[in-house]
């Protein structure tokens, strides 16, 4: 009963830690969305891993044999001095049960997110019924309406941190608890199936980001073999289980010492190969992380060799999707004609305007333009120029006709301020009706 309580407490604390960490890192803020997501991924992963895989073992540990005279045995006074048979029965069993329950949590998390979104949608509709209810809303802005009815955000940072936590816990204790590996497979399958369904039917389109999060995850995963080897070495080096070592105790309440301490590391036994490989891997990792430039100069890395790979990729102009080409053409021509701002060369616009279909299209975003990213487009409340009846979706706060798009245009002008004449950018004042005089100011500055 106690182990089940501990298991539930761990999962509840994980949820609380996740929420607090995400809010804290978001409050701190970072320069780019990818950097923000990467920092949240790391912070959530560290907290989940510590609470799931470290804290449970630490509070039950007894460090009398391995305190190294630092007094740690006076602080941590648990019941298990090593990975003993009792440890596997109590602590190991709780750890396995926690990971097994975690495997079935993704569908519950996703149901909670979808149910919350559905409840807010019904609240917006006033809980009305019938076919006409779908046309009722209290939202006055198109993007607030889309935010409410296009489903919850795809929280990619929590997905990464959850997967990393599963892998780290499995690799850390997998040698002594091999059942963690099939549990990890079950976790990944449930996670994959849930994500497939949610991305297709429930979530908003995931934001387009660079490869920073993927590289960060790969870097973190590269350290897991070290955990597997070194903690695995300590697990299968237990003398009570593998050598029948027994230390007499005077009372049943006393902790039986295992004879497994720092001095026994030099003993040659079944665990020695894992130690040797682990030490070699630690050395390689230190050299790779801290002395990479030196190794490159000495020719010990692949970077020193110029590897050319023919990916049979088309010319850039032949790889742009038609909708992306139309977007940049409309944006460039609109701001050139309306405000005299040219942020795309004329020949590039003409070539893209004549483009039909890409056989090998670019995945993601083709332009180094913030507003080409739907995440930033929505955050800025920007309405693209290729939008039909664009002015009808913009609330500009006055009854004057002809300036309805100014509010949205100002966003693009400020983002592309580097293309505005310096004297115009320094002296021009944005106000109602600025579109009528901005182009004149640009011409006067030529």
Image (cartoon, rainbow, N blue to C red):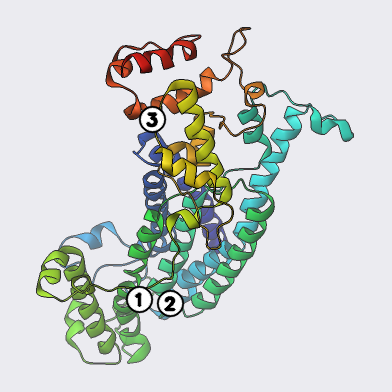
**Looking at this view, is 61 or 283 the one in front?**
283
In what element is the residue under mark 2? loop
Residue at x 72% of width, y 23% of height: 138
In what element is the residue under mark 3? loop
Answer left or right for 221 relative to 298. Answer: right
Q: Which tag is nearer the camera, tag 2 or tag 3?
A: 3
- Residue that carries the numbered disc 3 in the rendered image: 416
Q: Is residue 377 above or below residue 48?
A: above
Q: Earlier in the sequence, mark 1 or mark 3?
A: 1
**Looking at this view, is 267 or 388 the one in front?**
388
Q: Verify CB contact (< 8 Å) between mark 1 and mark 2.
A: yes
Q: Is residue 427 above or below residue 92?
A: above
Q: Verify CB contact (< 8 Å) between mark 1 and mark 3.
A: no
Displayed quadrant of residue 301: bottom left
- Residue that carries the numbered disc 2 in the rendered image: 174
- Residue that carries the numbered disc 1 in the rendered image: 228
Residue 145: where, in percent of width, then height? 66, 30
């Amino acid at each position: 009963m106690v182990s089940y309580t501990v298991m539930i407490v761990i999962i509840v604390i994980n949820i609380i830690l996740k929420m607090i960490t995400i809010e804290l890192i978001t409050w701190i803020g970072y320069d780019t969305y990818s950097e923000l997501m990467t920092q949240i991924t790391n912070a959530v992963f560290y907290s989940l891993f510590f609470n799931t895989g470290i804290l449970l073992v630490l509070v039950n540990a007894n460090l009398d044999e391995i305190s190294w005279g630092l007094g740690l045995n006076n602080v941590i006074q648990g019941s298990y001095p090593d990975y003993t048979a009792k440890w596997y029965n109590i602590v190991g069993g709780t750890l396995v049960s926690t990971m097994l329950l975690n495997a079935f949590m993704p569908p519950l998390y996703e149901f909670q997110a979808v149910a919350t979104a559905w409840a807010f949608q019904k609240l917006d509709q006033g809980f009305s019924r019938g076919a006409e209810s779908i046309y009722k809303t209290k939202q006055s802005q198109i993007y607030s309406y889309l935010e409410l009815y296009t489903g919850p955000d795809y929280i990619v940072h929590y997905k990464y941190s959850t997967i990393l936590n599963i892998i780290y816990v499995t690799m850390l204790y997998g040698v002594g608890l091999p059942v963690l590996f099939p549990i990890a497979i079950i976790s990944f399958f449930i996670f994959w199936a849930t994500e497939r369904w949610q991305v297709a039917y429930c979530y908003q389109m995931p934001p387009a980001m660079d490869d920073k999060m993927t590289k960060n995850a790969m870097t973190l995963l590269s350290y897991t073999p070290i955990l597997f080897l070194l903690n695995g070495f300590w697990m299968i080096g237990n003398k009570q289980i593998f050598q029948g070592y027994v230390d007499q105790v005077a009372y049943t309440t006393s902790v039986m010492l295992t004879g497994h301490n720092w001095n026994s590391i030099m003993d040659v036994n079944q665990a020695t190969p894992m130690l040797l490989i682990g030490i070699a891997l630690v050395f390689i990792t230190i050299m790779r992380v801290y002395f990479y430039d030196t190794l490159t100069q000495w020719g010990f890395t692949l970077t020193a060799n110029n590897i050319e790979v023919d990916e049979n990729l088309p010319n850039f102009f032949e790889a742009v999707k038609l909708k992306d080409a139309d977007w940049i053409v409309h944006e460039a021509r609109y701001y050139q004609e309306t405000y005299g701002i040219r942020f795309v060369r004329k020949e590039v616009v003409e070539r893209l305007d004549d483009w039909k279909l890409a056989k090998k299209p670019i995945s993601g975003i083709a332009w180094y333009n913030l507003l080409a990213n739907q995440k930033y487009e929505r955050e800025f409340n920007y309405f693209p120029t290729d939008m039909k009846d664009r002015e009808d979706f913009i609330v500009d706060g006055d009854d004057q006709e002809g300036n309805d798009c100014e509010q949205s245009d100002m966003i693009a002008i400020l983002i592309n301020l580097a293309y505005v004449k310096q004297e115009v950018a320094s002296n021009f004042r944005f106000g109602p009706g600025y579109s009528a005089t901005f182009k004149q100011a640009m011409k006067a500055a030529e």
